[in-house]
Image: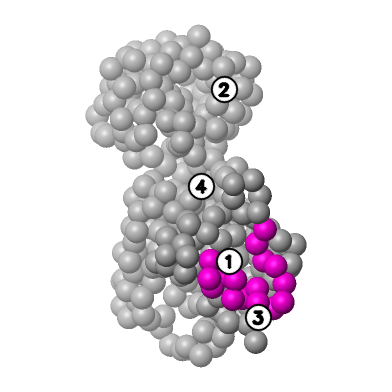
């Protein structure tokens, strides 16, 4: 008989990459987490971890077991759904997470609509960077997330998560008022190839999009300033320190002396909704997804 608690420790090692990181997330000591996996291996009569350099990796047997573990987790979600089935109005606690723009433009308005239309439903919002949103879902601390698609996300085929497209958020070229490109209705990015640029910090999920858009236009931007927050970027532009690509959903400080210009070729980032596999069937999650889709349909003008 497989101990599901020990199986969850193995899933956490796979998700976080090391026993130490998994133990931290599960509030175990590393030795306790290792003991759980060793006992699971003894129960099953197979090796689950093997050395790799200074670290460890999962064995083929562990990979096979995890495929079943993901299916078990999905069935457990369905079992909880069946046990708590209520054909009335969605009720209880719904926990959602998202990166700052998603919270401001999508999750906060959705929470207000849900509170009005489903008074028995309580929504709790947590701002989280994209990797953290996946961690919260995996740990059962969040029911629904809005994330940005990045190369570092779990693949869409990952059996643990259900990731669905929500909207495409275009990038606009943002320039100071009076800039030579400010009066155009649409601009080819190659026309800004010789400008000084303000780009997202290296760890930002948007940085690859910005560099890729410039690369497709045939140039590498001369990045002289880096910023984490879109409003910081906008203020740098307003002071004439460079130009930038900023997502249209980003709500910038009003009355800054800047101009947004739409880009030819429509460079954009993709936003996704994400739940644990099977979680989208929960009534509370289903109505939240419906509200998010309705908001997304009108969010990008």
Q: In the image, residue 174 lies at what x, y percent? A: 41, 24
**Residue under label 3:** 43
Locate residue 208 relative to residue 113 in the image: left or right.
right
Q: From the image, state whether disc 3 or disc 1 is nearer to you.
A: 3
Mark 2: give few (<14), some (14-19) or many (20+) Cα within 10 Å. Answer: many
**Observer-nearest of 242 and 9:** 9
**Residue under label 2:** 214
**Observer-nearest of 67 and 21:** 21
**Residue under label 1:** 11
Q: Earlier in the sequence, mark 4 or mark 1?
A: 1
Q: Range of the magenta residues?
A: 34-50
Q: Mark 1: which secondary structure?
A: helix
How far apart are the two marked residues, 4 and 3, measured between alpha carbons?
40 Å
Q: Residue at x 41, y 83 (%)?
A: 89
Q: In the image, residue 17 lies at what x, y percent? A: 56, 54
Q: Earlier in the sequence, mark 3 or mark 1?
A: 1
Magenta stretch: includes residue 33: no
How far apart are the two marked residues, 1 and 2, measured between alpha carbons?
39 Å
Q: Is residue 73 visible?
A: no
Residue at the far left in the pictured view? 255
How far apart are the two marked residues, 4 and 1, measured between alpha carbons?
24 Å
Q: Quadrant of residue 266?
A: top right
Q: Mark 3: which secondary structure?
A: helix
Q: Earlier in the sequence, mark 4 or mark 2?
A: 4
**Residue under label 4:** 148
């Amino acid at each position: 008989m497989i101990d599901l608690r020990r199986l969850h420790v193995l899933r956490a090692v796979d998700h976080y990459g090391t026993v130490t990181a998994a133990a931290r997330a599960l509030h175990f000591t590393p030795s306790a987490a290792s003991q759980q996996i060793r006992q699971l291996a003894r129960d099953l009569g197979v090796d689950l971890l093997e050395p790799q350099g200074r670290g460890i990796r999962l064995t083929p047997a562990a990979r096979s077991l995890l495929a079943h573990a993901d299916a078990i987790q999905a069935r457990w979600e369905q079992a909880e759904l069946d046990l708590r089935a209520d054909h009335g109005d969605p009720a209880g606690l719904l926990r959602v997470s998202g990166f700052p723009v998603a919270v401001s433009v999508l999750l906060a308005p959705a929470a207000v609509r849900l509170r009005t239309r489903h008074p028995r439903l309580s929504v709790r919002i947590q701002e989280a960077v994209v990797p953290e949103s996946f961690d919260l879902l995996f740990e059962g601390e969040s029911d629904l997330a809005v994330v940005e698609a990045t190369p570092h996300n779990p693949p869409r085929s990952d059996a643990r998560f259900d990731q669905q497209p929500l909207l495409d958020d275009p990038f606009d070229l943002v320039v100071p008022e009076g800039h030579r490109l400010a009066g155009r209705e649409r601009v080819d990015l190659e026309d800004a190839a010789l400008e000084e640029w303000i780009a997202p910090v290296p760890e930002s999920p948007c940085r690859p999009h910005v560099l890729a858009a410039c690369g497709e236009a045939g140039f590498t931007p001369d990045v002289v300033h880096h910023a984490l927050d879109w409003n910081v970027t906008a203020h740098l532009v307003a002071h004439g320190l460079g130009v930038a690509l900023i997502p249209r959903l980003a709500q910038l400080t009003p009355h800054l002396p800047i101009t947004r210009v739409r880009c030819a070729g429509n460079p954009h980032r993709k936003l996704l909704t994400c739940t644990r596999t099977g979680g989208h069937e929960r009534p509370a999650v289903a109505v939240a997804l419906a509200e998010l889709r309705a908001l997304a349909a009108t969010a990008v003008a």
